[in-house]
């Protein structure tokens, strides 16, 4: 009888360790996915000065648009931003960059210039990579949150202090499948 | 391009005259075969009777059989040459009319190294051959496809110590390679997800554990796509970069259009598609008239299957840094 209890105890301990390790792995996966997304976002921040430089000579009367994106970029690259602040800022940068690209539609010379075309392609590529990183991040968050909420890992999660993580909101037009490759098709 | 109308437009003026020319030759070859098959046995019987009853030397029988064997070999060469010229002329005409920038080579095929590069099929290949290579450019996309038959063998030794070799098909059908419109370094493989179709999420978990695929199972957000396909990728982010929501939708539509399961992979900025096909699409039949729309249409439809991925998967949209 004592041996049975001992065996049950050992098996229970092993199960707890396995489940705990699984939670740790999933949490690490979320952090790793967030870092990857961060790298992609930084690539976009690095492109913004190039975009502003390429466009400002042409769009003198619409300098507000350029100033806005420059301001947002400076905020996004500053230290100590919370997750929610980063999400909000990136949404605003998304809109600001799109606004600039829409403005460029009124300047055929700029639109046709080789350097601008190259920049536009690079931006499109970076946007898609950000989108992919976001999707990967959300998938890992979903996996982690499922583990935190499901029985029996939920009990271990509560005791060990694992909490649900928020998703990175995806803009409506990406969710509906009309992503940049459809939107930009007309430009090419 | 709206395929049926376009095909009908050029069948009458451009394809049918070539078929009529080859139909005459086919009839001649058919007659020669029938003559061999019908006349030779009659002559042989006559000769054997003559040997038995008259003073004809018995050696005339094996000599006659030897001549028949030579005639049969000559006939076989004649038929192979006919098939080769038929393919070059007829299929070549259909290919050129379909897309002027495509070239057809009946005896060439996608190399084994490119086949293995796709990472679609994991088995060792013991025998590999193919035919009917079509290559060229459609719009901005480089493309090549051919019919491929890849096999592996198993060997068993029976109680008497004799070895028996059995051949198993790994893949038989159309194998397509195209230059993808995005740059990426790793590999992502998309395979039909029959396990998950049958067993649901439990099946998917099992698939992730037991299948020896490159990388890890990638769980995507499109439930319809997930129901039909399982995705493996070396990099979770890159797999999602390649498989955008728009592309997933197009892959599903393309699968519905061709009406069969297919395997796809994305490796080093190329896309590979393996479409299983039974039978020989471009071969004429000896005993059936070739002046029929359905034979030419079959060629055309096979071409459409190979070239269709460019339009259906929108590979000509080049808005990323890869021009």
Image (cartoon, rainbow, N blue to C red):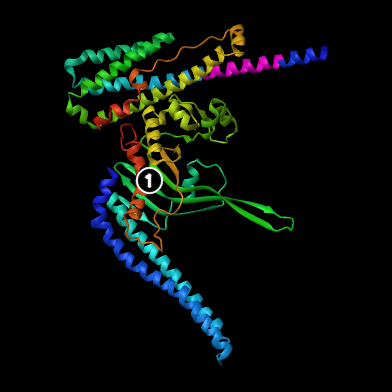
Establish if B72 lies above or below A73: below
> Residue B300's spot in the image, x, y percent?
33, 50
Mark 1 Cα-neighbour bin, 10 Å: few <14, some 14–19, many ≥20: many
User: Mark 1 belongs to which subunit?
Assistant: B
Establish if A133 lies above or below A188: above
In the figure, is residue B210 to the left or right of B255?
Answer: right
Residue A99 in magenta stretch: no
Start-end of magenta stretch: A12-29
> Residue B166's spot in the image, x, y percent?
61, 53
Q: Main secondary structure of the magenta part?
A: helix
> Residue B110's spot in the image, x, y percent?
44, 50
How many discs appear? 1
Residue B92: image quadrant is bottom left
Residue B143: image quadrant is top left
Q: Residue furthest bottom?
A: B55
Residue at 57% x, 35% y is B211
Residue A28 in magenta stretch: yes
> Residue A33's spot in the image, x, y percent?
48, 20
Residue at 57% x, 90% y is B53
Which residue position is annotated with label 1?
Answer: B306
Residue at 33% x, 49% y is B136
Image quarter in which the N terminus of chain B is found:
top left
Nearest the eye: B149 or B234: B149
Q: Is residue B1 visible?
A: no
């Amino acid at each position: 009888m004592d041996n049975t209890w001992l065996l049950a105890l050992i098996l229970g301990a092993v199960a707890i360790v396995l489940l705990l390790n699984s939670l740790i792995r999933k949490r690490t996966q979320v952090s790793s996915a967030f870092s990857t997304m961060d790298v992609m976002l930084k690539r976009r921040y690095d492109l913004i000065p190039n975009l502003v430089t390429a466009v400002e000579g042409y769009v003198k009367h619409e300098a507000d648009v350029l100033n806005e994106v420059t301001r947002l970029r400076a905020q996004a690259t500053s230290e100590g931003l919370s997750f929610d602040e980063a999400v909000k800022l990136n949404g605003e940068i998304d809109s600001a960059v799109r606004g600039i690209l829409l403005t460029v539609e009124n300047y055929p010379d700029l639109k046709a210039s080789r350097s601008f075309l190259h920049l536009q392609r690079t931006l499109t590529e970076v946007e898609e990579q950000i989108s992919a990183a976001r999707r990967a991040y959300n998938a890992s968050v979903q996996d982690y949150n499922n583990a935190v909420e499901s029985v029996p890992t939920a009990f271990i999660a509560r005791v060990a202090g694992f909490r649900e993580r928020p998703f990175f909101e995806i803009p409506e037009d990406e969710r509906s499948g009309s992503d940049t490759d459809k939107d930009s098709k007309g430009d090419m | 391009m709206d395929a049926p109308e376009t095909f009908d437009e050029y069948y009458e003026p451009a394809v049918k005259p070539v078929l009529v020319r080859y139909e005459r030759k086919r009839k001649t070859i058919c007659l020669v075969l029938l003559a061999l098959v019908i006349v030779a046995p009659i002559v042989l019987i006559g000769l054997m009777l003559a040997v038995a009853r008259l003073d004809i030397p018995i050696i005339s029988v094996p000599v006659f059989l030897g001549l028949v064997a030579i005639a049969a070999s000559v006939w076989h060469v004649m038929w192979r040459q006919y098939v080769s010229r038929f393919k070059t002329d007829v299929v070549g005409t259909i290919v050129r009319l379909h897309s002027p920038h495509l070239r057809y080579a009946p005896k060439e095929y996608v190399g084994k190294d490119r086949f293995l590069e796709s990472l679609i099929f994991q088995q060792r290949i013991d025998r590999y051959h193919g035919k009917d290579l079509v290559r060229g450019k459609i719009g901005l996309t480089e493309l090549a496809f051919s019919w491929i038959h890849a096999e592996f063998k198993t060997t068993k030794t029976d109680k008497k110590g004799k070895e028996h070799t059995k051949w198993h098909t790994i893949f038989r059908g159309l194998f397509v390679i195209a230059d993808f419109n995005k740059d990426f370094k790793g590999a992502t493989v998309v395979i039909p997800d029959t396990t998950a179709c049958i067993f649901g999420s439990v099946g998917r978990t099992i698939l992730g554990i037991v299948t020896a695929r490159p990388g890890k199972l990638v769980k995507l957000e499109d439930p319809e796509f997930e129901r039909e396909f399982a995705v493996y990728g070396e990099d979770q982010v890159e797999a999602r970069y390649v498989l955008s929501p728009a592309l997933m939708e197009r892959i599903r539509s393309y699968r519905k259009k061709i009406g069969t399961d297919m395997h796809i992979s994305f490796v080093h900025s190329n896309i590979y598609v393996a479409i299983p096909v039974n039978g020989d699409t471009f071969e004429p039949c000896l005993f059936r008239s070739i002046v029929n729309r359905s034979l030419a249409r079959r060629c055309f439809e096979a071409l459409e299957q190979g070239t269709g991925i460019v339009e259906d998967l929108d590979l000509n949209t080049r808005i990323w840094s890869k021009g």
